[in-house]
Image: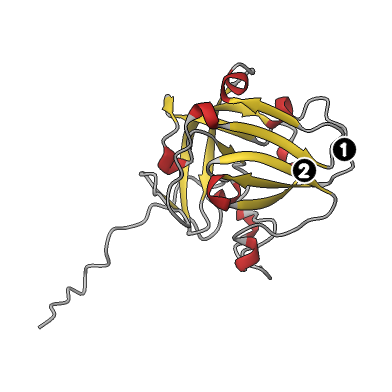
């Protein structure tokens, strides 16, 4: 026999400070691990990051070269499409402004590609101007593989699936094209403040 308490509604979900948590989101104190498949574990001596596509000369950094680039400490709120938000997350990473410095291209979009075959699409304008990083550290430690280490894209103003785990590069493209989740019905842009979770939102 099931026993039901009329007063019990489960753990109350924290709404968070006004103006920091988008519509339909709740504050998460932990850091949930959500992945579409197994966690890749690429040895650092085989890791590199490339910028290819609509560019005169492809660019490539080994892990050592990448870590020698100027990096930043970033504190941002992140918002998952599954409706949790985590506030004041602390990251360390290399700005996409640094990686794209001096690049001349007619491309207006980028397709991030990753270990494990994952991809996601972003307007190039959303990767520059201090809005995006390739993050290698979280909360003062090396980024765990479960959270996208050794390096992941960090684009905190969009839903977190756009911050692709295990990122290995960007392909600069002239027209927008869907990545992995976008091809399965997720929104092409993914603005949490406009609740752009799925195609048609």
- The crowding category of the residue bearing disc 1, from other C-alpha atoms within 10 Å (few below 14, some 14 to 19, many at least 20), is few
Considering every residue shown, the one lying at the far left of the view is 1
- The crowding category of the residue bearing disc 2, from other C-alpha atoms within 10 Å (few below 14, some 14 to 19, many at least 20), is some
Q: Residue at x 65, y 36 (%)?
A: 132
Q: CA distance from mark 1 to mark 2?
A: 10 Å
112 vs 12, nearest the viewer = 112
Badge 2 is on which residue?
A: 124
Q: Quadrant of the C terminus?
A: bottom right
185 vs 1, nearest the viewer = 185
Q: Element type at marker 1?
A: loop
Q: Position of residue 102 (x, y in %)?
A: 83, 25
Q: Residue at x 17, y 73 (%)?
A: 5
Residue 123 visible? The answer is yes
| Marks 1 and 2 in Cβ contact (< 8 Å) | yes
Q: Element type at marker 2?
A: helix
Q: Earlier in the sequence, mark 1 or mark 2?
A: 1
25 vs 70, nearest the viewer = 70
Query: In the figure, is residue 140 to the left or right of 102?
Result: left
Q: Is residue 134 above or below residue 27?
A: above
Considering every residue shown, the one lying at the far front of the view is 46
Badge 1 is on which residue?
A: 105
Q: Position of residue 138 (x, y in %)?
A: 45, 31
87 vs 17, nearest the viewer = 87
Residue 91 visible? The answer is no
Q: Position of residue 121 (x, y in %)?
A: 69, 52
């Amino acid at each position: 026999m099931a026993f039901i308490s009329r007063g019990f509604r489960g753990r109350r979900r924290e709404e968070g400070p006004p103006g920091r948590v988008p519509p339909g989101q709740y504050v998460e104190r932990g850091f949930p691990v959500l992945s579409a498949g197994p966690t890749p574990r690429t040895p650092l001596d085989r890791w590199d990051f490339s910028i290819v596509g609509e560019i005169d000369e492809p660019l490539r950094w080994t892990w050592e070269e990448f870590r020698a680039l100027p990096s930043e400490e970033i504190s941002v709120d992140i918002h998952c499409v599954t409706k949790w938000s985590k506030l004041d997350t602390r990251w360390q990473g290399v700005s996409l402004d640094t990686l794209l410095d001096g690049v001349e291209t007619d491309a207006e979009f980028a397709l991030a590609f990753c270990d494990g075959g994952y991809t996601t699409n972003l307007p190039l304008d959303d990767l520059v101007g201090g809005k995006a990083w390739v993050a290698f550290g979280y909360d003062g430690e090396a980024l765990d593989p479960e959270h996208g280490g050794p390096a992941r894209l960090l684009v905190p103003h969009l839903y977190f699936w756009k911050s692709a785990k295990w990122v290995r590069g960007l392909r600069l493209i002239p027209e927008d094209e869907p990545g992995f989740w976008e091809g399965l019905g997720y929104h092409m842009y993914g603005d949490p403040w406009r609740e752009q979770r799925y195609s048609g939102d």
